[in-house]
Amino acid sequence: MIDLLSPAFLITFIVGCLVGTVPLMLAALGETIGEQSGVLNLGIEGMMLVGGYAGYVATLSSGSSWLGMLVGALAGAALSLVIVVLNVWLGLNQIVLGIAVTLAGGGITSVLYDQLYSKTAPRADTGGALKIPGLSDIPVIGPSLFSQPGFFWVTVALVVGVGFFLRRTNWGLSIRAAGQKPASLDAAGGSVMRTRSQAALLGGAFAGLGGAYLAVFATGAFTPFMTNGLGYVAIIVTMLARGRVLWVALVSLLYGVTVALGTVLQLTSLDIPTDVIGMLPYLAVMIVLVVFARSVYISPALGAPYTRGAR
Amino acid sequence: MASERSGRVRGIVETVVRSVLPVVLALIAGGIILAALGKNPFVFYGAIVENGIGGTNWEDSLVMMAPLLLIAVGLIVVFRGQLWNLGSAGQYLLAAVVVTGIGPWALKTLPAALAYLLLAVAGAATAAVWTLVPAWLKARFGTNEIITTLVMSTIGAGLTNILIENVFQDPELNTPQTSEIPIADMLPFIPGTQVHVGFVVAIVVAIVFQVILSRTSFGLRLDVFGASPKAARHVGISSKRMIVLLFVISGGLIGLGAAMDMMGEWGYLRSNWNPHYGDAMIPFVFLARLSPVGSIPFVAFYAVFATGGTIASQQTGLSVDFLSVIVALILIFMTITEYVGTKRRLGQSYLPDELKNTVRIPFARLASRSAA
Amino acid sequence: MDQPAPPLIALRGITKAFPGVIANDDISLDIQRGQVHCLLGENGAGKSTLISILAGLQSPDSGRIELDGETVRIGSPKAAMDLGIGVVHQHSTLVPALTVIENLMLGERGLLQNRARAIARLDELSGLLGARIDPDAHASDLGLGQQQQVEIAKAMWTGTRLLILDEPTSMLTPQAIDSLAESVERLTAEGLGIVFITHKLREAYTMGDCVTVLRAGRNVGHISTERMAELSEQEAQRTILTAMFGDDLAAAGGLEEAAELAGATEAERETEAVDFATRPVRLALRGVSTAGSTLDAVVHDIDLEIHAGEILGIAGIDGHGQTALAEVVAGQRPAASGAVTLDDVDVTGLGVRGRQTRGLRYVTDDRLHEGTVGSLSVALNLMLKRIGQAPFWRFGQIDREAVDTEAMNLIAEYGIRTPSSATRAGTLSGGNIQKILLARELGGGANVVVVNKPTYGLDLKTVRLVHDLLAEFAAGGGSVLLISTELDELVELSHRIGVISRGRILGVVVNDGPTTAEKVGELMIGGDHDGE
């Protein structure tokens, strides 16, 4: 049995935490932007898969993981156009559309992967970690926290950025109003449709980023249906965080901890079936949801299409 | 009189068009995707028909209809109450593992009829119990049931694997799977066919629920609840009781479907197998306007499509997940067809006002610029 | 000689049709600077549509709008704002979860919020309105009077030449109405043009410099500023009423009746006086409280008694626990403490259906989403509260013929105008939907009926009908708990009037003379002071 406090163990644990946290955090950030504006994106799972696949392919063919992330974001945003046009513009049922986007995203990436890569299953070259000079020499957190891929730090910046954007800009104010009481935004001269479209596109891009991070950095390869419900966890994180970006980060981190716990449990001599370990994070999420069910919050106008003059 | 009849005929034609058109459009769009992947769509669709109906394959399709139809009715009941049970996969798997887990023992020790009944009840009860957490959260706190059923489904699938590998594992095999129900002990066939009686059970259940939903006081209460929970409260319907009841019925029917499928078709369950029947049924129950009997032709269509499609995919070297792309396309075209139909009926423009302005303003600007 | 200056805004031949109804039919009118122009008309006369057009929420089918003599197109709310048209809508447009200053900044351009500039602008407007408002208070925490001040500030945020107030007094206490009048006076002194919309004649006369009357989408009468100054109050009223009712004046029951319907005069009690000491108590509430998270969902320690044949009115500003009171009586909301008794039997533990069968009924104010199910037929809507009961259901199975026969009877009895009993209820007009509710609740063994805002949003003829039905019901020995925000209605129908504020009954006034309204008003003001 390995020593639970040995540096090697702690490094594995921290790295595992971050690997589990970042894709979820990105997706949940996107979902938060969407939900704040009143768009419930149930297709997030499909967008993550499409983003993951596109990011993987782009990284493979260009050799640049940065380009891979960009393509992943664009792919997620492109798929969210379905939501933008059919839900935000025409007011069609968001639940049905969300299921459709999830099925389509999962199906098409599986078909394409099967056609092109299933025989060779190549791994994406991420270009290694970005070792931050000086800090990466600190014991334990140096080789873990400060030796993350460069995009990890972009994610940190995005968290701060989205928090600022929602609270301190007029754009963010419009987004919050669109989710709380769209008629007010309309009466104030803003455009509910434009605001929600922008938010839904951003949400799709973030979901795509989350999926791409999962494929490119967390596992190094795409596999069909690799998100395995992570998108729905992102929606739960969003529900629990109630629009507060710091909480999105914290709840995502909590999820990452349970993922990492599973990973390190496998390193111990305890004989725990992998199925149990795989289930742990979902179980944790469900328990948190049951405990905090009272405080789960949903924007009053969430998912209701806005029609001017309708009450 | 004549105009009334022609009006009714037009109504029927429109309903049929609205129900069939999305499927046709999805198949066309799917064909285009197939062509883009370098496959001949005509060959692919031809292979589906051949393998779904040709020879004795129609019997395989009917066999598949048994669980599909029961799950469809299970979804119809909750959807009518405007509740979303999207966790059918986990409910189905848990029911299936319980049925296959205790099946061999039950069929060995009990008279066959009693054993079938016990297994059917066990399957239904297991799946129904699995809906209780989402149902309770929804009833007590209004927690979004879409998300909770989905997550419970993931947990259910994991729990199924654990049960297979640790509790019901066939000791004589190395692959993770339950012991098999001996072929002789499985559900009997309808005389003269290779279709087990689960198919009959499914049809009967569909008819019974058709009557319940359209003719009884429970059906009307359900419609009031689905149309407006506020109105339901006003007329004295307890929404908490209704939510739990609907989820339990839904889960029970899904579990019954699993029991029929396991007792009549498979006889065992291996780990990581997940047919995702419920996801595929979602568009079709809506196309059938949430009518149990109305859903029968749609379920039959999908059963042929899936039975033939699985083989056709293998023949053409395509992942079977292509079928879920088609299902997704049907969903999307269904919402669009509904939208166009509603707008046409109301005589409204197809574009919302704000969108029209967005389109018009650039043109107006262009015009004013060119005028200047 | 110079041309006279063009009016601030001129509407020319504005027409707007919706499926099945012409909301505005060739309306023309002028609005001058520094004047209050009253738009008067009953519900459905086309006032709201006209406002929507000026606010850029709707586009007219034909006609044009001139601003300072130049034709303008108001294609969006933003365009209206840019032209200097500010609107205070009848229903609050503040976002409850945002602060006052965030609400005011909503819709501003530029990436970053400019808070300092916004606060400076709020100070400026506060001076003009004569109100002080904490910029960081959440909009949901403001009293109704303050909310309205913020709404006006919001309408004037980007500099306004024309201010439109849509039914601004409907939610206010008499005292808050006075302070609104003061604000309006200050604003006209600054040269603003003000459009003041109301359905109350008295208000139009006191507030307006000139009055335009709308009926069925048409401009049916205008009294210019000069005429207004010449006419005595009574003459002005007569002119306006003739315009408002036209040929229907006789149908409405003559000038006097019409004046009363249109809220021209102080209302008087019309039901007969009854000595209640000799009559049994039908419904009693003893120390009833409810739990809830919003103001309207909570009542505290309610004690009430209603006798047989009595109409007990409940006055108060909308959203002060009226819904909770109605629901706790009807059995839709559990009482956290206290007891409800019906004919001396404790029914606290019974639900809706148990009380329904004992003759306790509830006509809800949310006709469209609570009282009826729009997607179901008129017949089923009439039977909603008898689902599963014999003889309409046997062994759980519906007897469609029995249901239809009963429905046809009720349709005939209450004069519900519907193509057939199978028509979907959602397609009927508001007045006919209200008749469905009344037919369902007042018929078949009703003893006590709770009525919540029974005439809200109805045209005057249906209002008359509803009043007659309720008075008749009481005359026949039934008891009514009449909850309303219309003081005139309460005074006309009730034997006693209780005042509710923040979920408490502040007092009950016996309706026995011309001073009732005044007494009720005093109670209401007291309540409002307590709260803020």
Image: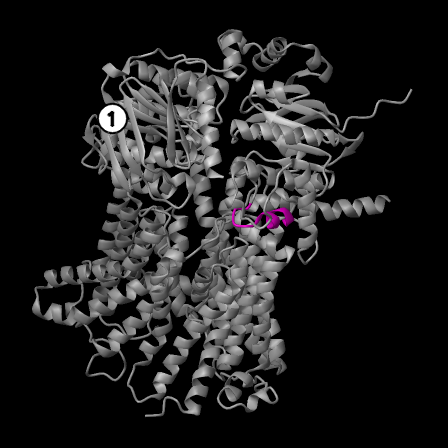
At 62% from the left and 28% from the top, the residue drawn is C181
Relative height, residue C19 to residue B353 (above, below): above
On the image, which quarter does residue C132 sit in? top right
Amino acid on which the number 1 mark rests in the picture? Gly
Is residue A115 something that shows in the picture? no
* Horizontal side of residue B38 vs C497, given as left or right: right
Q: Which residue is mark 1?
A: C359
At 60% from the left and 67% from the top, the residue drawn is A161
Q: Foreground: C269 or B196? A: C269
Report if residue C102 lies within the magenta region: yes
Q: Foreground: C218 or B112? A: C218
Q: What is the x, y in percent for residue C441?
A: 32, 26
On the image, which quarter does residue A137 sit in? bottom right
Q: What is the x, y in percent for residue B263?
A: 20, 65
* Horizontal side of residue A125 vs C273, given as left or right: right
Relative height, residue B291 to residue C379 (above, below): below
Report if residue B84 lies within the magenta region: no
Relative height, residue B322 to residue C56 (above, below): below
User: How many numbered badges does the structure rendering display?
Assistant: 1
* Horizontal side of residue B313 vs C209, given as left or right: left
Image quadrant where one finds the N terminus of chain C: top right
Magenta-highlighted residues: C95-106
Q: What is the x, y in percent for residue B35?
A: 55, 66
Q: What is the x, y in percent for residue A287?
A: 33, 66
Say which element carries label 1. loop
User: Chain ID for label 1?
Assistant: C
- Number of other residues with Cα within 10 Å of mark 1, as a class: few under 14, some 14 to 19, many 20 or more: some
At 76% from the left and 35% from the top, the residue drawn is C72
Is residue B313 something that shows in the picture? yes
Q: Foreground: A281 or B97? A: A281
